[in-house]
């Protein structure tokens, strides 16, 4: 089984392709809850149809929302989930935001800052 949680960077774009997915044992399963651009969709479909992969659960897609005519909707080995890999808990989020605002007002460092150079 392969579970993709990578950030999307130039180095990880298209990383889930025929070459990398073929390295999974026959009967392997792919779960992608990171970014749609990690997955080369045609390569996944080919490996599923050949029987090399047993299935995939996909929460993210190159085009969102996933078009109604997309083959993922009808493929018997693919489970499409509604892009909700994590629920936002309102009270927890409010407390976190308020805490960061207070830290910034005090001149204290805060966690979770995105570094545009790294891509995450």
Image (cartoon, helix red, strand yellow):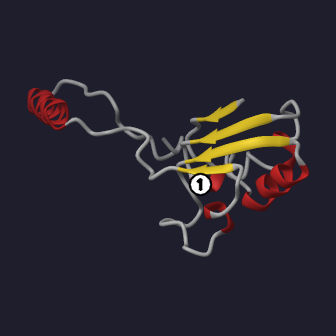
Give left or right: position of 114 versus 64.
left
Picture residue at 14% right of the left edge, 27% below the top: 103
In this rendering, the answer to whether 109 lies above or below 59 is above
In this rendering, the answer to whether 61 lies above or below 94 is below
Number of dots carrying numbers: 1
In this rendering, the answer to whether 20 lies above or below 36 is above
| The residue positioned farthest toward the front in the image shown | 76
Picture residue at 40% right of the left edge, 46% below the top: 84
Of residues 114 and 15, the one nearer the viewer is 15
Q: Secondary structure at mark 1?
A: helix
From the top left corner, tell me how far across and down residue 75 is, in percent.
70, 59
From the top left corner, tell me how far across and down residue 82 is, in percent.
45, 53
Give left or right: position of 76 versus 116.
right
| The residue positioned farthest toward the bottom in the image shown | 69
Q: Which quarter of the rendering shows the N terminus?
A: top right
From the top left corner, tell me how far across and down residue 120 is, in percent.
48, 41
Give left or right: position of 76 versus 97.
right
From the top left corner, tell me how far across and down residue 93 is, in percent.
19, 35
Hey, which quadrant is residue 86 in on the image?
top left
Of residues 70 and 93, the one nearer the viewer is 70
Of residues 77 and 16, the one nearer the viewer is 77
Of residues 49 and 36, the one nearer the viewer is 49
Picture residue at 57% right of the left edge, 35% below the top: 5
Mark 1 lies on residue: 36
**Circle 1 Cα neighbour tier, 10 Å, few/some/many (<14 / 14–19 / ≥20):** many
């Amino acid at each position: 089984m392969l579970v993709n949680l990578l950030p999307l960077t130039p180095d990880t774009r298209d990383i889930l392709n025929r070459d990398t997915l073929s390295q999974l044992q026959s009967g392997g399963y792919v779960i992608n809850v990171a970014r749609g651009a990690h997955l080369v969709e045609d390569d996944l479909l080919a490996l599923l149809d050949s029987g090399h992969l047993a299935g995939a659960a996909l929460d993210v897609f190159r085009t969102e929302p996933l078009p109604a005519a997309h083959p993922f909707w009808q493929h018997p080995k693919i489970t499409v989930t509604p892009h909700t890999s994590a629920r936002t808990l309102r009270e927890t989020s409010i407390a976190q935001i308020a805490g960061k605002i207070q830290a910034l007002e005090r001149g204290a460092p805060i966690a979770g800052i995105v570094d545009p150079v790294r891509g995450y």
